[in-house]
Image (cartoon, rainbow, N blue to C red):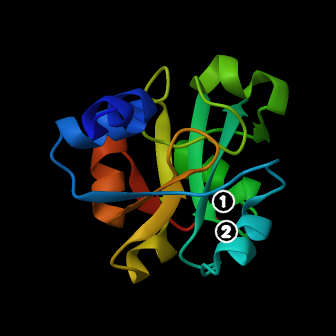
Amino acid sequence: MGMAKKDKRNKTNAMRILERTGVDFRVETYECEEFIDGIHLADQLGQSYEQSFKTLVMQGKSREYYVFVVPIAEEVDLKKAAKVVGEKSLEMVPVKEINAVTGYIRGGCTAIGMKKQYDTVIHNSAKDFEQIIVSGGKLGTQIFLAPDDLCRVTGGRFADIL
């Protein structure tokens, strides 16, 4: 079987969008029996907590959805985040609803190429790195890309949300 064929099937929406927009990125795959969380994964792969980012989906009081990209070991400060997106309050979208809202599954959720383009906020610390690591759009896949490129493709912005 030729490489091109296999490649196509394994591409996620996120990868197709990055290719289409001409973003320079790298994909790494890993074995994933079960996804526990980003910290276990970084430990397993010998990656830095600061450079590895998780994608969290929240819903505001207005019922609008928002996407927050933060370092894996950190938690979003809900007050700061709500202020940034102009909401009174925010709450996490339950895991069972993640797929319906984003088109991705938990552990494979990335801000790029969700079902709809939600308002996306990336934590400022991403700018400390030439490249950050985010989920590739499915379990067992990571994307390495420049923070500015992530910001551009998601129509996002950087803010202090921790």
User: Is residue 155 among the parts visible in the rendering?
Assistant: no
Q: Nearer the viewer, residue 139 or 97?
A: 139
Q: Nearer the viewer, mark 2 or mark 1?
A: 2
Name the spot of residue 154 as percent of width and height, x first: 37, 42
Using the rendered view, name the quadrant where residue 145 is placed.
bottom left
Q: Which of 55 and 156 is in front in this view?
A: 55
Residue that mark 1 sits on: 80
Q: Name which of mark 2 and mark 1 comes first in the sequence.
A: 1
Residue at the front extreme of this rendering: 1
Residue that mark 2 sits on: 162
Kind of residue sitting beneath label 2: Leu
In what element is the residue under mark 2? Answer: loop
x 79%, y 50%: residue:
35
Considering the image in quadrants, where does the N terminus appear? top left
For the residues labelled 2 and 1, the Cα–Cα distance comes to 7 Å
- Determine whether, in the image, residue 34 is placed left or right of residue 32: right
